Image: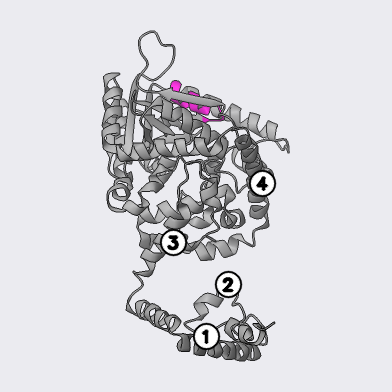
């Protein structure tokens, strides 16, 4: 299934008619929002904790180069290897080279948005290396040839009944409607994969600079099995995931769990920073961390008004709170990163021309900012991206905006425009026989995808003149 962010309007139109999608997303977001509200109500000073987490991420961004080098020095001191990847192709090639060096043929991987971003699994398949997703949601997506639709809950767009049918079709599971039976079946299928794997992979929710540990948080045991059993482990970590200290981590991990899934803490919190030492019963013999840039340093250095977007901890709270996401789901965004934060970072990572509709895929209601555990001002960034995109529309667009500005700054022209609009609206209604007419080109760009509001019978100024004495 191809993903194209510029197809948002078309994809959203289809999604709005998909009853199964509406059911699945509504169930999931309603549940998660309720859990989040309960989890946040337990915090004595939520806003204080929120600003503390924000401060940790902003300090990390301020000292980003130094913190990355500090983490690298600690990892290498413990016998690990750190590789730097400018883009997705280089990161994938690093993984392939490691596999060839150690003659690795089959691997298991815990959930990672970074590896989704760089399309790692197709690259490994092309090189003859089998990689199995072990997060239950990601595993279902992999065997069905789908894409994740949510940062935290990749299978949010599927109902239980759809998952049952996928298992029956792809894995010959016996018919059952019990979620526990389906989970047990998947566990049996995956258990042997861990044992047979010669490579384990993960992402990284955090990279602790002061000790060089990668931390992943999960609600399934797959993360520990993927990182501890295979003889070689590779972690692909975005450079923005670094935080200065364990104290900062202690703040952020609370905010991540409470915001993402409504838990006080995830079931598993795994930290690893190198190969197994002498006497340790588990852990890899060889340990690699690939620090992924893939456009992040460009945002950091050149897109300074958007640099704060790198503070995102990928909790998915803004997706759950967004009325647009709630209605169209994640696939409509045509990107690994969906929802409000995806509408910001996808244009920045891919190039604004490759994701033109996304900054406009928002009501600007501010729910995303209210939900963000590190208080990222997503609505302001969306407005700034809209402004940037409008300035790339060409001379005709610029001329139209200038004319609009002149008309709205001149009282006589403004009044004349209002009269003309009311007359034109009535004529359009008579011609089309409806109070929601389709406008002629080039104005049909509006009415093709939204209703055209009727103009008032009189302006406020006219009404005030007649009624001010009352």
Q: Which residues are magenta?
A: 218-228
The percent coordinates of residue 441 (x first, y second) are 49, 84
Q: Which residue is mark 2?
A: 450
Image x and y of residue 6, in percent:
44, 63
**Disc 2 to disc 3: CB gap under 8 Å:** no
Q: Could you tell whether 51 is left or right of 259 in the image?
A: left
Secondary structure of residue under mark 4: helix
Colour scheme employed for the rendering of this structure: one colour
Compared with residue 41, is residue 223 higher up or lower down, i.e. above or below? Answer: above
196 up-or-down from 33: above or below: above
- Count residues near mark 2 (Cα–Cα under 10 Å), then give few for <14, some for 14-19, many for 20+: few
Rendered position, 172 above or below 419:
above
Circle number at residue 383: 3
Q: CA distance from mark 1 to mark 4?
A: 40 Å
Badge 3 or badge 1: first in the primary sequence:
3
For the residue pair 366 and 135, the one nearer the viewer reads as: 366
Marks 2 and 1 in Cβ contact (< 8 Å): no
Q: Is residue 388 magenta?
A: no
Specify the quadrant of the image occupied by residue 454: bottom right
Q: How many marks?
A: 4
Cα distance between the residues tagged 3 and 4: 27 Å
Residue receiving disc 1: 440
Query: Mark 1 or mark 2, which is nearer the start of the sequence?
Result: 1
Q: Position of residue 362 (x, y in %)?
A: 52, 60
Work out which residue is located at the far top of the displayed protein and give it: 279
Give the class, few, some or many, for how many residues have Cα within 10 Å of label 4's Cα (few <14, many ≥20). few
Question: Is disc 3 surrounded by few (<14), some (14 to 19) or many (20+) residues within 10 Å?
Answer: some
Work out how far the residue at label 2 is from the one at label 1, CA to CA, in angstroms: 14 Å
Mark 4 — residue?
30
Q: Which of disc 3 and disc 2 is earlier in sequence?
A: 3
Foreground label between 3 and 1 = 3
């Amino acid at each position: 299934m191809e993903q194209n962010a510029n197809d948002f309007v078309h994809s959203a139109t289809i999604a709005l008619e998909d009853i199964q999608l509406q059911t699945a997303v509504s169930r999931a977001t309603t549940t998660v929002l309720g859990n989040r509200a309960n989890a946040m109500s337990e915090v004595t000073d939520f806003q204080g904790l929120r600003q503390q987490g924000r401060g940790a991420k902003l300090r990390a961004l301020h000292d980003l180069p130094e913190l990355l080098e500090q983490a690298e020095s600690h990892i290498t001191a413990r016998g690990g290897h750190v590789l730097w990847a400018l883009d997705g192709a280089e990161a994938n090639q690093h993984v392939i080279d490691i596999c060839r060096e150690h003659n690795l043929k089959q691997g298991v991987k815990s959930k990672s948005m970074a590896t989704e971003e760089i399309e790692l699994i197709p690259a490994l398949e092309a090189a003859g290396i089998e990689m199995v997703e072990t997060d239950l949601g990601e595993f279902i997506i992999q065997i069905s040839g789908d894409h994740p639709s949510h940062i935290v809950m990749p299978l949010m767009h599927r109902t239980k009944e759809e998952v049952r049918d996928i298992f029956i079709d792809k894995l010959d599971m016996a018919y059952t409607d019990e979620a526990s039976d389906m989970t047990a079946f998947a566990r049996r299928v995956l258990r042997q994969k861990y044992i047979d794997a010669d490579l384990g992979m993960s992402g990284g929710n955090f990279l602790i600079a002061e000790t060089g540990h990668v931390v992943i948080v999960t609600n399934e045991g797959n993360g520990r099995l993927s990182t501890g059993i295979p003889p070689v482990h590779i972690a692909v970590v975005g450079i923005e995931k670094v935080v200065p200290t364990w104290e900062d981590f202690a703040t952020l991990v609370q905010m991540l769990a409470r915001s993402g899934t409504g838990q006080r803490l995830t079931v598993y919190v795994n930290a690893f920073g190198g190969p197994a030492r002498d006497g340790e019963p588990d852990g890899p013999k060889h340990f690699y961390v690939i620090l992924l840039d893939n456009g992040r340093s460009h945002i950091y250095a050149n897109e300074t008004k958007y640099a704060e977007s790198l503070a995102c901890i990928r909790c998915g709270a803004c997706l759950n709170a967004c009325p647009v996401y709630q209605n169209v789901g994640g696939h409509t965004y045509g990107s690994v990163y969906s929802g409000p934060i995806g509408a910001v970072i996808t244009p920045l990572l891919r190039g604004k021309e490759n994701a033109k509709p996304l900054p406009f895929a928002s009501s600007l209601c501010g729910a995303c900012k209210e939900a963000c555990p590190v208080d990222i001002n997503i609505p302001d960034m969306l407005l700034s991206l809209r402004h940037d995109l409008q300035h790339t529309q060409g001379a005709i667009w610029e001329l139209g905006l200038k004319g609009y500005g002149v008309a709205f700054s001149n009282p006589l022209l403004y009044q004349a425009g209002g009269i003309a609009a009311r007359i034109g609206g009535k004529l359009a209604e008579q011609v089309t026989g409806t109070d929601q007419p389709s406008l002629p080109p080039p104005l049909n760009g509006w009415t093709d995808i939204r209703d055209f509001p009727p103009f008032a019978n009189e302006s406020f100024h006219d009404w005030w003149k007649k009624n001010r004495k009352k």
